[in-house]
Image: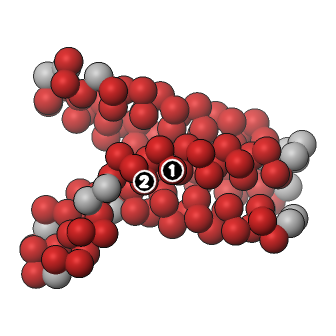
């Protein structure tokens, strides 16, 4: 594993955590600490950066056994971002439900990808 690929893995993990922690923006902890609220604000930017960085990670990783699970997770992220483009055209409740379902699915897929990569 190259150092650049390891760096991409760490950036991907940090961006994924920042994306998943976005609901904390409305918590009392974020209200008390404006810097935390400001850090979690660019949720959409983090998602796009995660898509790009994870693609670079996939290219740098090459042909490994966990490649398929990584592609499935990446496609789930892509679907999540494409659904975000239709936010204004959908009812808020149904869009939010879809967004949450795909976010949880992405978390499960990434966990499976990491376990698959570590075991094999």
Position of 98 relative to 115 (above/below) = above
Q: Is residue 110 left or right of residue 82?
A: right
**Quarter occupied by the N terminus:** bottom right
- The structure residue drawn at horizontal position 39% and vertical position 50%, both measured from the top left corner, is 45
Q: What is the spatial separation of the Cα atoms under label 2 and label 1, in whole angstroms?
A: 5 Å
Spot occupied by residue 14 in the image (x, y as percentages of width and height) = 51, 66
Position of 5 relative to 32 (above/below) = above
CB within 8 Å, label 2 to label 1 = yes
In the foreground, 45 or 93: 45
Does residue 104 appear anywhere in the picture?
no
Spot occupied by residue 70 in the image (x, y as percentages of width and height) = 69, 43
**Quarter occupied by the C terminus:** bottom right
Report which quarter residue 63 is drawn in.
top right
Direction top: furthest residue: 89
Q: Residues within 10 Å of mark 1 (few under 14, many from 20)?
A: some
- Element assignment for label 2: helix
- Element assignment for label 1: helix
Direction bottom: furthest residue: 33
Report which quarter residue 68 is drawn in.
top right
Does residue 15 appear anywhere in the picture?
yes
- The structure residue drawn at horizontal position 14% and vertical position 68%, both measured from the top left corner, is 27
Residue, disc 1: 49
* Image mark for residue 46: 2
Q: Is residue 69 left or right of residue 42?
A: right
- The structure residue drawn at horizontal position 42% and vertical position 34%, both measured from the top left corner, is 81
């Amino acid at each position: 594993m190259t150092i650049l690929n390891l760096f991409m893995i760490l950036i991907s993990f940090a961006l994924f955590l920042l994306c998943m922690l976005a609901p904390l923006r409305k918590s009392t902890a974020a209200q008390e600490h404006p810097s935390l609220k400001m850090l979690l604000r660019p949720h959409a930017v983090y998602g796009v950066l995660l898509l790009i960085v994870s693609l670079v990670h996939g290219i740098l990783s090459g042909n490994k056994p966990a490649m398929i699970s990584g592609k499935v997770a990446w496609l789930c992220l892509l679907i999540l971002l494409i659904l975000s483009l239709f936010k204004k055209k959908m009812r808020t409740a149904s869009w939010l439900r879809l967004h949450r379902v795909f976010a949880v699915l992405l978390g499960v897929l990434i966990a499976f990808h990491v376990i698959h990569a570590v075991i094999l």
